[in-house]
Amino acid sequence: MKNFNNDTSAAIATAISGSSAVITFTQTWQPVVTFGVGILGIISGVLAVVYWGKKINRLDGKGKN
């Protein structure tokens, strides 16, 4: 016969341990992810400036197209 008190305690302990592991993992890798997202934002901004610069030149008749 199962002892439900031990199973419940084990399930709670496993949930706490698993959530602690996930929290530790996310705290460890957060600076790396933040750096990557920051670089991606900078690249996107530069590409947006280049795009709009080319579009403005076309509207002024200075560009090829």
Image (spheres, helix red, strand yellow):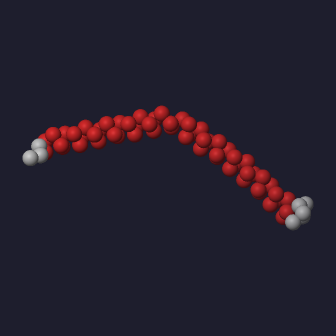
Residue lying farthest front? 1
* Of the pair 56 and 10, the residue shown nearer to us: 10
Total numbered labels: 0
Residue 9, visible in the rendered structure: yes
Left or right of 46 on screen, residue 59 = right
Left or right of 53 on screen, residue 64 = right
Looking at the image, residue 12 lies above or below residue 47: above
Give me the residue at 48% from left, 33% from top: 28
Give me the residue at 51% from left, 37% from top: 30
Residue 20, percent from left and from top:
35, 36
Which quarter of the figure has residue 19? Answer: top left
Residue 37, percent from left and from top:
59, 44
Give me the residue at 73% from left, 48% from top: 46
* Of the pair 36 and 11, the residue shown nearer to us: 11
Residue 45, percent from left and from top:
69, 49
Image quadrant where one finds the C terminus: bottom right
Residue 34, percent from left and from top:
56, 40
Give me the residue at 22% from left, 39% from top: 10
Residue 60, visible in the rendered structure: no
Which quarter of the figure has residue 6? Answer: top left
Which quarter of the figure has residue 16? Answer: top left
